[in-house]
Image (tube, helix red, strand yellow):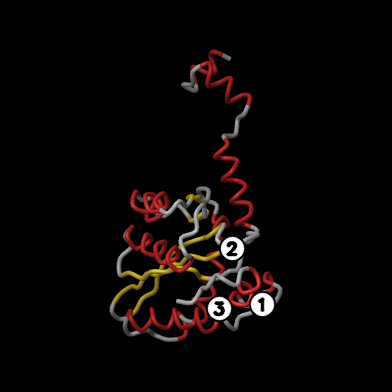
């Protein structure tokens, strides 16, 4: 045991502690969170949010959109747009979500391992809001499938519909589709054939997802 501990560069005390509990509490918690996320499930509003970034070309250049989705109601609770993939862009989306949802504490915000979400600014913003960051495993693309499925809808219903001239035009069209169609008209099997708006009214009438 001493040789193994020395090879692994553990102290003997740390090595025996690891033998007793090889999975850290934080790792176990993260795996439980990720398991729920991969099953597209959260029991209550404002407990688990997922976030990701999509990009698309216009004649002016690329537009980047960061969106945050409540895993309970499937509602898009915050977003930000940018012409560059910078950390402040992800922070702006988080700030938007917190403002719209009344600053809930203890929200788990799950993302992939993109630089924007690993940045000091984003981690500092999570801490300031009393939120907890969670990241997908390296190479496990399914860990953020909840956001990828949403962006697939955006791609099909907005991005691929035409050639976009300006970033402003594209951004406005994405927002309009989310607010008018995705939130208010698109019924989802996981929500009992309700729309995100209808589901949130049932779950908690005081919560509003209006832009």
Instruction: Determine whether the residue tagged by mark 1 lies in a helix, strand or loop.
Output: loop
Quarter of the picture holding the C terminus: bottom left
Q: Nearer the viewer, residue 101 or 63?
A: 101
The x, y position of residue 70, in whole percent, is: 55, 64
Whether tag 1 and tag 2 are in contact, CB under 8 A, the answer is: no
Reply above or below: 134 against 150: above
Image quadrant in which you'd find residue 22: top right
Please name whichever residue, 192 or 118, is drawn nearer the observer in this view of the structure. 192
Looking at the image, residue 159 sits to the left or right of residue 20; the answer is left
Within 10 angstroms of label 3, few (less than 14), some, or many (20 or more) residues?
A: many
At x 39%, y 74%, the residue is 56
Residue 202 at x, y percent in the picture: 66, 73
For residue 45, the mark is 2
The reply, left or right, for residue 68 in relation to residue 82 is: right
Residue at image x 44%, y 63%?
Answer: 98
Find residue 183 and name its label.
3
Front position in the image: 203 or 96: 203
Compared to 169, does 118 lie above or below? above
- The residue lying furthest to the top in this view is 2
Is disc 1 surrounded by few (<14), some (14 to 19) or many (20+) residues within 10 Å? some
Q: Which residue is pictured at 30% across the width and 65% down the height?
A: 84
Label 2 crowd (10 A; few <14 / some 14-19 / many >=20):
many
């Amino acid at each position: 045991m001493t040789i193994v501990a020395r090879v692994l560069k553990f102290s003997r005390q740390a090595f025996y502690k690891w033998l007793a509990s090889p999975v850290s509490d934080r790792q176990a918690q993260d795996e439980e969170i990720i398991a729920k996320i991969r099953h597209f499930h959260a029991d209550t509003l404002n407990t688990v949010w997922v976030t990701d970034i999509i990009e698309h070309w216009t004649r002016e250049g690329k537009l980047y959109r960061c969106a945050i989705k409540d895993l309970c109601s499937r509602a898009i609770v915050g977003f930000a747009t940018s012409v560059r993939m910078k950390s402040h862009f992800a922070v702006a989306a988080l700030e938007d979500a917190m403002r719209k949802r009344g600053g809930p504490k203890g929200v788990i915000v799950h993302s992939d391992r993109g630089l924007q979400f690993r940045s000091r600014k984003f981690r500092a913003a999570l801490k300031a809001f009393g939120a907890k960051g969670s990241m997908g495993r390296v190479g496990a693309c399914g860990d953020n499938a909840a956001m990828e499925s949403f962006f697939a809808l955006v791609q099909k219903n907005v991005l691929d519909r035409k050639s976009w001239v300006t970033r402003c035009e594209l951004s406005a069209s994405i927002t309009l589709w989310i607010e008018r169609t995705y939130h208010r008209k698109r019924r989802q099997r996981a929500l009992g054939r309700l729309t995100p708006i209808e589901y949130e009214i049932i779950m908690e009438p005081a919560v509003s997802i209006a832009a």
